[in-house]
Amino acid sequence: MRHLDKLKIPYEAVFYDGQGLNGREIAEANGQDPDRVFKTLMTMGKEKCYYCFLVPVSGDLDLKKAAAAVGEKSVSMLKSDQLLPLMGYVHGGCSPLCTKRPVTITIDQSAQDGDYMYFSGGKVGCQLKVSVSDLPRMMEFRFADIRKVL
C-alpha cells in the first residue's frame, strides 16, 4: 500500500479473515467475482530466474504456458519455505509489488476483460482492488495467456 500511496495510485484495501481458505473461497466470502480476483504465484526458471504470475482464482496457472510466456523451457513453483527468504512474503500473502528479489511479472490476459482486479496486498488477509489501467504505473509486467481453466 505504501508503494501505491507513494505513486499516488488509487486503490481500495480489502481486509478479511482468510485463514484456511483458498482464493476462490475468499472471493466468494467477500462477494467478489472470482474472475477478477487474482492469485500471485512465484516460480523459478532453470537458471534461478524468478517469475511472478497472476491468474484468476477461478483457474490455475498452466506451467507450460507460463514458461513459454517468459521464454523458459519450464518453470517450477517456489516452495512455501522459500517464499519469505527469497521474495519477502509468506504463502497466501504474496504480492507482485515490492518483492525482495527482482521478478518478471506476467498477468493472465483475462485481466484486460474488466476495469479492475484484486490481488494480494502483501500479507494474508489483505487484498488490493486496483484499476487495470493503472497497472503500468505500479509495475513492469506483460499480459499473456497463462491460465488453465478449472
Image: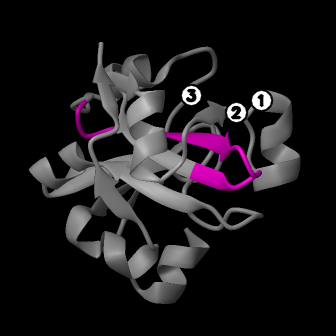
Residue depth check, mark 1 versus mark 2: number of the one nearer the observer: 1
Q: Which residues are magenta?
A: 35-51
- Percent x, y for residue 67? 49, 41
For the image, the number of numbered tags is 3
Report x, y in % for residue 135.
Answer: 33, 69
- Type of amino acid under label 1: Ser
The residue drawn where x is 40% and y is 49% is 69
N-terminal of the pair, mark 1 or mark 2, is: 1
Q: Which residue is mark 1?
A: 80
Q: Which mark is residue 17?
A: 3
Q: Residue furthest front?
A: 73
Q: Secondary structure at mark 1?
A: helix
**Where on the picture, by quarter, is residue 74?**
top right
Is residue 127 among the parts visible in the rendering? no
> What's under tag 2, amino acid-wise?
His
Quarter of image, res 128: bottom left
Mark 3: amino acid = Asp
Is 1 placed above or below 24 here?
below
- Label 3 or label 2, whichever lies nearer to me, is 2
Q: Quadrant of the C terminus?
A: top left
Residue drawn at the location 25% of the way across and 40% of the way down: 36
Say above or below: 106 vs 64.
Answer: below
Q: Is residue 18 magenta?
A: no
